[in-house]
Every structure is written in structure tokens, then in C-alpha cells.
Amino acid sequence: MKIFRKVLLQVCALSACMTTAAFAQAELRDAVDAGDVIAAQNMVKKGEAEEIYCGKLSAEDAVKVYEKIFKAMPFESFENCSAQFVYGYGAKTCSNAKAMDACTEVVSYLLKEGENGNVKALETLDPVVKAALKTKAYAKPVKVSVDTSMWVPCPKKKGAAREACIEECLERALNTKDTVRADLCETAPEHYIDTTVKVSVPSPLYEKLRKGLLEGYWKTQKSTAERYAVLIQKNARALSIPDTSVINLNYVARWADKHKADSTALPGGELFRFCTSWQPAVDSILAKKEFETRCPVFETFVDSRDGQSYKVKEINGVRWFVQNLNYAIEEKSMCYDREEENCKTYGRLYTQEAALAACPEGTRLATDDDWKMLEIYAGGANTAAVRLRSNGSDDYAFTAMFGGYANKNGISVIQGEGAYFWTSKDVGDGRGVARSMFATDKEVATIPVDKKFSLAVRCVVDGAPAEKATPAAAE
């Protein structure tokens, strides 16, 4: 706290703002919570702050209040105000040659959010990476201490220390049957010691970007995979990513060639990911290489209530929405963390009462039996998640997204880790039946859930597939 105050006063001194001995942290929090940006700005300018507090400020407003502090104390600002700092000041931080640690935190945050399918994070990552790669100081290798064991010359001066060293050299050489070393123990004796050495390693920020972008393409939702591919292609040269690792249509062609040579089936999850990014070009590659497999074809269902379109895939005779429903029902549906960006990525979360009425006309909420049939078709409930989740193999293009849930108090949890879907079944005692699956598990679980909890919804289209379904590119 003293360090913060000292730096804060220095920042104020540089900007000729007034400082006072009396701090008013409670008043500052009240102003931030009330969204009174001007009042918060004035308090910070006068030094009336003991910590960085952003509350529910937008990234833009947080920068208005704290910009000088963000610049002077980037790492501390990130720790206390992560989201606002990243989205409002991330690119500027990564343009500061002295702020590599803070820039690394910004990049880590955005890569993690990108893996979770956060479009806003990937849009922000683009200028952040651009700024970081322009900052020459970040490209330099760094010295790190490494514990190792090595041969070190014995003392040159005759005496007990040299004799002991020579004896140690001979003993080790004999134990390892190293005759060459044994001869050297007489002429150029060395002993084997544990030590710490300084070695140069590539820029940790560059390493994080290389690994994060390449792994992110495979970990993120299929709908956002192409954004990773674009970032990889754009920054491959600066990050020294080999051409063979750059994910593009040439990569797809080599992938297809390998499976052709090995006479192995094309993995569904990888194929759908490529199709999401580059269909129909992927189909053209497969046709030229004489594969019978093609990208999945979807119907398009348009919700007449709000004009939103949903992709529909027939899986084992059932026409599933392969996107979470995103129709707003006042007071009975919500976005994760009440952020609209989350609805765009994951759809809305509904109480079971709302879920039963949410699906558009001509569709219905998936039943417990619908889910049971899906699980059996996907290999059984114990392993079905691998074939259904959006960052698994997803052999059926079901695209289960890990949008988390909200409890009856509206508190959102485990986005990016767990997926929860209502069924229409009621088990009594204020609970309904839901399905859950996790990013790190194979199982699709059947669980009773308080009806006031908010979960995702998958609709099923009534009746047989239309004879003239509108095809849509896989997403």
C-alpha cells in the first residue's frame, strides 16, 4: 500500500495534480460502483486512492480514470483491474519496452480467453501482438539460471585440494569405465560438480505467443478457430514459426496427404475445424485427393421472433440445433456474467421454466430421451463427450460449448470448463434433469439441477428434414 501511494503521488506530481494526506478509498469505490467516471477521475487526480479499483467500469472508462497509473504501474494495474486493463490498455502496455512482464500477463489473459471462445479477446489480441512484436526489447533472448552438473578443471596449484580432485576424477572415471577420462585425470584433471550456470533462452514472450497461438487453434471453439489461424499466418515470420506449422489450406492439404498415405480415416474433429475455417475450399482439396468424406452440411433455421439463424444437423435421425439458443426472455434468461459478448459466443442461459418455452415455433427443448439416443450413438454416456464437445474430436459437429452456468443468485461459474444443458424432464422437489460435460472429461453426465439455475438450451426441430434445406458453411 505504501509503495502504491508513493508511486501514485509521483504520478500526480508529474501531472501537477494536487495530493492530500486524507485518502478517500470508500468514496472512490462508491463513485466507481455508481459509474460516476468524472468524480472518480477527480479523486484519483487529487491522490484520493489507496488501491486500483475498477468494479464494473468499462475498459474505456477505467482508462479515463486510471491511465497515468496504468502507465506507471502496469503490473499492479493488471493484478487489480485485469479485464479493464487488458482490453483498455493492453496494446499500449505492450508498446512499453520496460513493461514486458505486464505485457506477458496481458497476452496470457487474452490467449486463455481466446481458448474459451471469447471473440472480443481474439480481436484485442491482434493489436496487442502487433504492439509486442514492434517492441524490440521483447525480442531479445534472456539469461536464466539453470541447475546442471559438469566437468570443471581441478585447481592448478599443487596441494591437498588438487590431489583430492584428481582422486575424485579417477574414481568417477573407473566407476563409469571411461578410459579416456581416466587418462585425462593424469594430464588435465577435472572433477564433476553440481553447479548453476547462466544460459540464454529465447524471449519468453515470443515463446508464449508461438505456443499459445499454435495450441489455441486446436483448443478454442470451432467458430473462433479461424481467428487463431489468421493470427498465426500474420505473425509467423516474426515469431519464427516454420511454414509446416502455419495452419492454412496448405496445412490441410498436407494433413490429407498424410492420412491418404497411411490409409487412415480423416479425424472428424480436425476435419470440422478446417471446414469451419475454409469450407468449401476444404471440400475441393478432398475431392482432388479422391476422398469420399466431405465437410458437414447444415440446414439453417431462422427464428422468426428475432431473426437469429441457427445451424441444424441431423444426427442419428434427430435434427439438433448445433448452437446454443440465444433468444432473450426477460428476467428468466441471462448472459454469462451478464456480458452480451458471452451471449454472442455461448448463447443465453435459462431457468428450466424459461427453457421449456424458449425454443422457437417448430422446435422444442431436447428431451431426456433425445439426449440418451445421442449419447448411445456417440459411443455411450461414459465416452460421448469426446465426440460431442467443440474442442474434442466432435465427430458429429454437435459443438457442445463450455459456457458454464449461473446459480439461482445469478452468479456465473466455470465458463470454458463445463457445459450444462437443460432437458424437459422434471424430477420433482424443485429440480429438473440436465446434461453436463467438461473440457477435460469423456463423460456426458445426467444430473438433477435446481430449476432456478440458468443453463444452456439445445432445441430439436420437429418433423423430418426439409426436402430443400438451405445449406450453410460449417461453423
Image: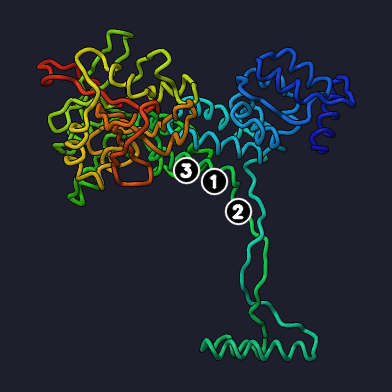
Quarter where residue 364 is shown? top left
Q: Secondary structure at mark 2?
A: strand
* Quadrant housing the N terminus: top right
Q: Secondary structure at mark 3?
A: loop
Q: Is residue 75 visible?
A: yes
Quarter where residue 404 is shown? top left
Q: Earlier in the sequence, mark 2 or mark 3?
A: 2
Amino acid under disc 3: Ile
Q: Is residue 274 visible?
A: no
Query: Which residue is labeled 2 in the image?
Result: 201
Residue 307 drawn at (x, y percent): 31, 9
Q: Residue at x 56, y 27 (%)?
A: 127
**Left of 226 or right of it: where is 260?**
left
Q: CA distance from mark 2 to mark 1?
A: 10 Å
Q: Taking 238 as reference, is 301 above or below it?
A: above
Query: Which residue is labeled 1 in the image?
Result: 207
Q: Residue at x 80, y 86 (%)?
A: 157
Residue 404 vs residue 273, the one in the foreground: 404
Query: Which residue is labeled 3 in the image?
Result: 241
Q: CA distance from mark 2 to mark 3?
A: 16 Å
Q: Earlier in the sequence, mark 2 or mark 1?
A: 2
Residue 103 vs residue 312, the one in the foreground: 312
**Left of 246 or right of it: where is 176?**
right
Residue 206 drawn at (x, y percent): 56, 43
Q: Earlier in the sequence, mark 3 or mark 1?
A: 1
Mark 2 and mark 3 in contact? Answer it, CB < 8 Å.
no
Dot 2 crowding, Cα within 10 Å, few <14, some 14–19, many 20+: few
Dot 1 crowding, Cα within 10 Å, few <14, some 14–19, many 20+: some
Dot 3 crowding, Cα within 10 Å, few <14, some 14–19, many 20+: some
Residue 434 drawn at (x, y percent): 30, 33
**Left of 457 or right of it: where is 283?**
left
